[in-house]
Amino acid sequence: MVKITKPAQAGTVESNDIMVTVAPAESGSGIVVELTSPVIKKYGKQICAVIEKTAKDCGIQDALVNANDKGALDCTIEARVKTAIARACAGEAK
Amino acid sequence: MLNKAGREIPSVIPGLGEVKLYNGAFGTIPTGRMVGPKIALNKPRSEKLVKSIDQVIDAAGLKDGMTISFHHHFRNGDYVLNMVMEAIARKGIKDLTLAPSSLSNVHEAIIPYMDEGVITAVETSGARGKLGKYFTEGRLKKPVIIRSHGGRARAIECGELKIDVAFIGAPACDTYGNINGISGKSACGSMGYAIVDAEHADKVVAITDNLVPHPLFPISIPQTNVDFIVEVDSIGDPKGIASGALRISKDPRELKIAEYAAAVIEYSGQFKEGYSAQLGSGGASLAVAQFMKEKMIAEGITGSFGVGGITTPFVNMLEEGLFKMMYDVQDFDIPSIESIRKNANHIEMSASYYANPHNRGPIVNNLDFVILSATEVDVNFNVNVITDSNGVMMGASGGHCDTAAGAGVSIVVAPLLRGRLPMVLDKVQTIVTPGETVDVIVTERGVAVNPNRKDLIDNLKCANLPLMNIEDLQKIAYDLAGKPEDIPVTDEIVGVVEYRDGTIIDVIRKPV
């Protein structure tokens, strides 16, 4: 299990990108995603699912994720989430 | 009931009553006669000049419940519609139907008059921004009626859209009401949409910032159609009326699409001496014009006529003798306005001549090619240009379905993805142009030909194009973006989309 120790961010608000901010959350709170997106009606569920899955695959159990999406594809979302998590966990002994 | 485009449309729509359902592109045979305006007497040396908009509203006899019209040649630079609506609202007139040829963002200033009940119904080609949102929220008493440019001319000429008072912004107007669009500080070029209003409205009011002595020439709208004239300081912002010369795109994706579209034209079997074309004003369309020009010069082909929506690339081809002439219903940039002023073979036409399906034959019937853009297309080749990915009105029908139905080869150009959104869907949100009239869909990843056009499929085989089934094209998009969910909508109908023949091809339901 990996623990998020500090807030961190990855991505931009350019078209086709997503800005992902991850922050520590209380143990047991799970991965809470706050999403804003121009395609939320058509892809909101899928974006949230990709964020959650990516976070869990990184070993995160509890996190507050704020995602400001600008129409990113899943591969982009995954990359931004991984990077944000890596930054949020930096310095923590593995 | 299901219409012939496969859409579920109630036969009675609240606010509009019973409607005719779309029955195929030429499946509805019109009956009846064209209508005309009230007969009038204007004695010799009578005075048409009225001091103010306030006074002309009284003189025209505008009352509660009437229908008023405007034209959109001033585009986002228009002052006339807002100016007139403000005066009407001041007088306390209510329950009007607003029937402009289209609406631009600048017209969001009239939203308060809709809240106050001054305007309770709207019939237009389209709406964007706050107006589109307002209509989609269902805040008007009646659903908005969306008509194509040809469909609007038809509705006026057959009496379905009866205009009580037409307000016409006149870049040049003489003291007895002859009007043209080519001179003055607010010149807009062609007056094509307003010509139909002027011929059929019961009262016609010219509003001008360029009153000249009688007689004005050339004449676009004659004195025989005009009841009153009002002089004002300014009818429009020249910067909003026309842009500088529209430039060819540098976007590599648009260029790729344009290259494919030009190849479709070249190998279609109809690219030959005397061919005709309408090109849109979007980035890819303008680039197509450039590629076509190169091919025409290389192969020694000249065209017979062009149609528009005129833009600089087309004007250049006219002036270089690559097209014999040009029919013009509206101008988009300053060189086009200059061209209609100086080139005798650049001819103004009315919206009816352009695209009305129920006259003796509009010019779209003679078109060989049209290039059209799209917000979305679907695997049945249907095209949406009116609602966005959230189901909100944000575009305009324009001449889309008119030219698609008329042209020998109708080509729709669109990127395969916009942001994350696939442009080839199972079902478009709203059908404006039925798939039976769309022949080729061109994206940067592939080109799909309507299976009904076996001739084109054969001809394009040697064009070295990435030809594929529309389903395969869609699969590429869905593999990249995922399958989009449907937009949940309520049962409330906030807009109806008329096909050019007056039947209902689709409705816009209020999103949840």
Image: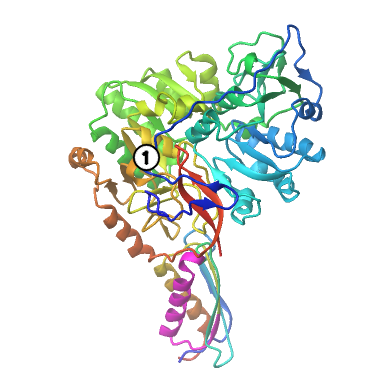
- The magenta stretch spans which residues? A41-64
In x, y percent, where is residue A19? 53, 68
Asked if one can make out residue B146 in the rendered structure from this viewpoint, the answer is yes
Q: Is residue B198 left or right of residue B55?
A: left
- Identify the secondary structure beneath mark 1: loop
Nearer-the-camera pick, B257 or B153: B153
Q: Is residue B98 left or right of residue B31?
A: right
Asked if the magenta segment contains residue B248, the reply would be: no
Asked if one can make out residue B258 in the rendered structure from this viewpoint, the answer is no
Tell me the kind of residue under disc 1.
Answer: Ala
Main secondary-structure element of the magenta-colored stretch: helix
- For label 1, the crowd category at 10 Å Cα-Cα, with few meaning under 14, some 14 to 19 and many 20 or more, is many
Instruction: Tell me what residue is drawn at x 46 percent, y 53 percent.
Output: B9
In x, y percent, where is residue B148? 49, 38
> Up-down: is B167 above or below B374?
above
Nearer-the-camera pick, B8 or B369: B8
Q: Is residue B216 left or right of residue B1?
A: right
Q: Which residue is mark 1?
A: B25
Callout 1: chain: B
Q: How many marks?
A: 1
Instruction: Tell me what residue is drawn at x 30 percent, y 23 percent.
Output: B297
> Up-down: is B364 above or below B259?
above
In x, y percent, where is residue B269? 22, 31
Nearer-the-camera pick, A3 or B458: B458
Asked if the magenta segment contains residue A53, the reply would be: yes
In x, y percent, where is residue B74? 62, 31
Quarter of the image for the C terminus of chain B: give it.
bottom right
Instruction: Tell me what residue is drawn at x 33 percent, y 44 percent.
Output: B436
